[in-house]
Image (tube, helix red, strand yellow):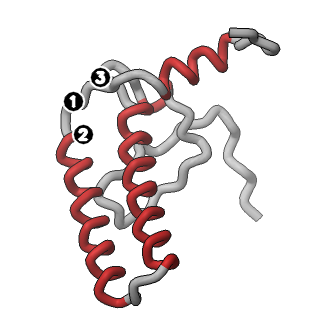
Amino acid sequence: MLAKYRINSDEAKLIDRNFSYHQPFGDQPERYVELRSMARSFAEMITNLVPVSRERSLALTKLEEAVMWANAGIARNESQTAKAEDLDLLSLETDPNAKYQLPPQQTDRAAAPSS
């Protein structure tokens, strides 16, 4: 293969993470089932309420993609030895009513002065 560009170490890590098998552990299988179950209910709703059309097909495809990416998010970003601070969670927001939540992030920033 003729390579025009070189893969840097960050890209190599990302490729390794994204194209490797991630053995489920802990409560991951149960969370996968919960995600698929909720998506199935929504898929049934879409199928019952939307006429057969390209748009319905796309909605169902995007729902499949959403489940796939949610499962990949679990598989790729958790490990049996990883700690929350090892993961890049700063950009994620949590819903206080969500069943699964990320632990609160601790930062070294000083508290903002109150006005």
Q: Contact (CB < 8 A) between labels 1 and 3? A: yes
Spatial CA span between label 1 and label 3? 7 Å
33, 78: nearer the viewer: 33
- Name the spot of residue 32 as percent of width and height, x first: 25, 48
- Name the spot of residue 101 as percent of width and height, x first: 37, 51
**12 to the left or right of 73:** right
Question: With respect to residue 108, does 54 lie above or below?
Answer: below
The residue singled out by tag 2 in the image is: 28
Q: How many callouts does the rendering have?
A: 3
Q: Secondary structure at mark 3?
A: loop
Spatial CA span between label 2 and label 1? 6 Å
Residue at x 26%, y 25% (from the top left corner): 23
Q: Contact (CB < 8 A) between labels 2 and 1? A: yes
Question: Label 2 sits on what residue type?
Answer: Gln
Question: Label 1 sits on what residue type?
Answer: Phe
Q: Secondary structure at mark 2?
A: helix
Residue at x 35%, y 66% (from the top left corner): 97
85, 18: nearer the viewer: 18
Q: Earlier in the sequence, mark 1 or mark 3?
A: 1
Q: Secondary structure at mark 1?
A: loop
Spatial CA span between label 3 and label 2? 11 Å
Residue at x 69%, y 40% (from the top left corner): 110
The residue singled out by tag 1 in the image is: 25
**109 to the left or right of 73:** right
Which residue occupies the extreme front position in the image?
1
Q: Earlier in the sequence, mark 3 or mark 2?
A: 2
Residue 80 image label: 3
Question: With respect to residue 35, does 6 lie above or below?
Answer: above
Question: Label 3 sits on what residue type?
Answer: Gln
